[in-house]
Amino acid sequence: MNFGFTGDQLALGATVRDVLRAHCPPSELRTERRPAWKQLAGLGFFGLLLPADSGGLGLSPADVLPALEETGRACLPGPVVETAVLAPYLVASLPGLASGTVCVSVLPPGQAYAADADLADLLVVARAGGWHLVRKESVRLAPRPGVDPCRPLFEVDFEVSEELAGSVESALLAVTVATAAQLIGVARELLAVTVAYARARTQFGAAIGSFQAVKHRLADVAVAVEFAAPLVHRAALSAGGPAGAPRPSAERDVSAAKAAAGEAAGLAARAALQVHGAIGYTEELDLRFWLARAWSLSAAYGTAAAHRARLRTAVLGGGPGRYP
Amino acid sequence: MDLDFSPAERDFRAEVRDWLRAHVPRPLPPMDTAEGFAAHRAWEALLAGARLSVVSWPERYGGRGASLIDWLIFEEEYWAAGAPARVTQNGIFLLGPSLMEFGTPEQRDRWLPRMARGDDVWAQAWSEPEAGSDLAALTSRAEPAPGGRRLYGHKTWSSRAAHATHGFGLFRTFGTRHHGLTYVMFPMDDVVVRPLAQLDGLPGFAELHFDGVFAPESMVLGEPGDGWRIAMATTSSERGLTLRSPGRFLATADRLVALARDADPALADRAARCWIDAEAYRLHTYATARRLMAGEQAGPRASMGKVFWSELDLRMHALAMDLLGDRAGDTAWLDGFLFALAGPVYAGTNEIQRTIIAERVLGLPRAGVRR
């Protein structure tokens, strides 16, 4: 029992953080669809989970978790987890994947629309119980309204596709954990930005962050994030890498993580908006991007309620117990 | 870095599990009755005989020198087995760690082994009628006397005091507020104890009146006047790992999910949320244990744990009440609910904890600071 991140895992996260600070500032979110992708590709980010014979590093989801959290913290747009996490499980041999020159979008089961599908060179589509690989040139997309301006949604239609053989369960587990990690990053940034605002904004002659009502609300956010994060870490350990198999508890652990991370980010968004007041309700303030990301990722790959229902089935169904 | 238990940790878990399976008694009478108090003390002696009452303590005091991880494993098995609540808790989890850190070798040798066996059962005496959340406002005094101290004043909400053999608390020797307080242990013999019935009707705490109760110098912990610092170390462990390990909440959550098996979806969803939160507390605690074992301090982040577990415990028992309706009293859930209601109040109210989190973890300004 030695539950924590290694120095290497944290260092990778710090490197990604530095790159995103430099190349994905909030101003880029208003103009660019994929800011910092080129720089991340230069770091080898899109090959982290790929096996060596596909030009990757063969790392596991737990190895890249702090880095994925940073992509959430920066509100990095584009199909990040689909390309960097899901694709290595399903289409590792896709040319250009490791170098970040292609990207992948997903329409998961239970969802109506695919995010960022217009950017994708390849779509992975769940339909009628089966899985399909659809190339860019075979797909017809119709934009649909969504909550997140940096994560546009599309209705997907196609006639020509390639059946995807083999199990997609590991890939879905991994991309769900990765999304949960992004939600933790989004929540941490929402909290940090809101704390900074509460320290700076004065009313009644005092910083609003000195008022107990504001303090306690933000303390609740801190608690929610603090306790959601280890669930995500454990889920990443359970999900296993592209070369391995998920642990027996993986489905339960991933559902626990996604539910808790989504709720924490939702709470952070709600508190951020309330503490900012009217300025937080504007299109002009950068906060809106993080609010929208909290909402859009909470719904992606299963809502909190859907994951709790899955967890309950797993726990009551005689799955692996809590204790060895 | 992983969540896998080592072979030694697995062996330890198996030993604990087997021993508990063979020895855990049928539910004992409530510990705040005379009969129940005696039964719980006898259980503590049995645990101590197997060197399981304080596994993380050094061997010379009755423990096994086990790691924090082993202690967490013990707690998981203990609560999963439905073993009795710990009547020695104030001693082994609050005073014990302070003695270990601040006591003289003589004090440790004298008190810790007896504490580990339940020979002495300790009550805590901190709050006063006018010093609750604002503990530093306390006015009880420890006045110098030949060979020791004489205690004067009025303490209240003293857990276990109705039946305890000894107490420990903070008493003013000089100064004001946090300065000049002395940490004193005392025998209960000459203390006037007025038991207070709690919501369950049993005297789980008491008022203590001191009118010159004598405590020998050997029962002063640390330097006279240094009591605040010592007490804060105790509250830090109380809020941190030792008072409420995850094991008890994991066991409750598992029973709750089973209780909600056929419940309507809204109630079942609440049960699933509790299961997740109990697991979150467990994982967070494993991560914290790793940091503490590496020499880090719990610090103000311990307040986050206190808020989290106390509200989780209450949420779980409130859900059980909703699931059971008027049948709740036929089960242990009713007593559990009443006990859980105290969680957000004791060991520093959750309002105090949230303020600590906001100011000392998040860095928000203290109230009244003008810009």
Image: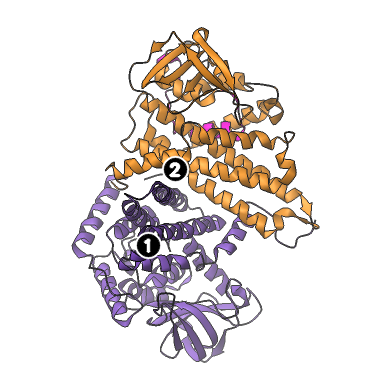
Magenta residues span: A53-78
Label 2 crowd bin: few (<14), some (14–19), many (20+), radius 10 Å? many
Q: In this view, does B168 lie to the left or right of B23?
A: right
Q: Do discs 1 and 2 belong to a common subunit?
A: no
Q: Output the chain of dot 1.
A: B
Residue at 58 percent of width and 71 percent of height: B133
Q: Which amino acid does label 1 sit on?
A: Gly
Q: Return the x and y of residue B93 as percentages of the image width and height.
A: 41, 67
Q: Return the x and y of residue B39 as percentages of the image width and height.
A: 27, 76
Are the residues flagged by discs 1 and 2 in contact, CB closer than 8 Å? no
Mark drawn on residue B344: none
* A228, above or below B53, in the image: above
**Eye-nearest disc, 1 or 2:** 1
Residue at the spot of label 1:
B325
Mark drawn on residue A231: 2
Residue situated furthest left in the rendering? B22
Mark yes or no: residue A104 visible.
yes
Quarter residue A126 falls in = top left
A150 or B84: nearer the viewer: A150
Q: Quadrant of the C terminus of chain B?
A: bottom right
Q: The purple chain is which one?
A: B
Please, what secondary structure does the residue beneath circle 1 have? helix
Quarter residue A26 falls in = top right
Was residue A321 drawn as part of the magenta stretch in this picture?
no
* A302, above or below B269, in the image: above
Residue at 50 percent of width and 88 percent of height: B209
Chain A shown in which color? orange
Was residue A64 drawn as part of the magenta stretch in this picture?
yes
Q: Output the chain of dot 2.
A: A
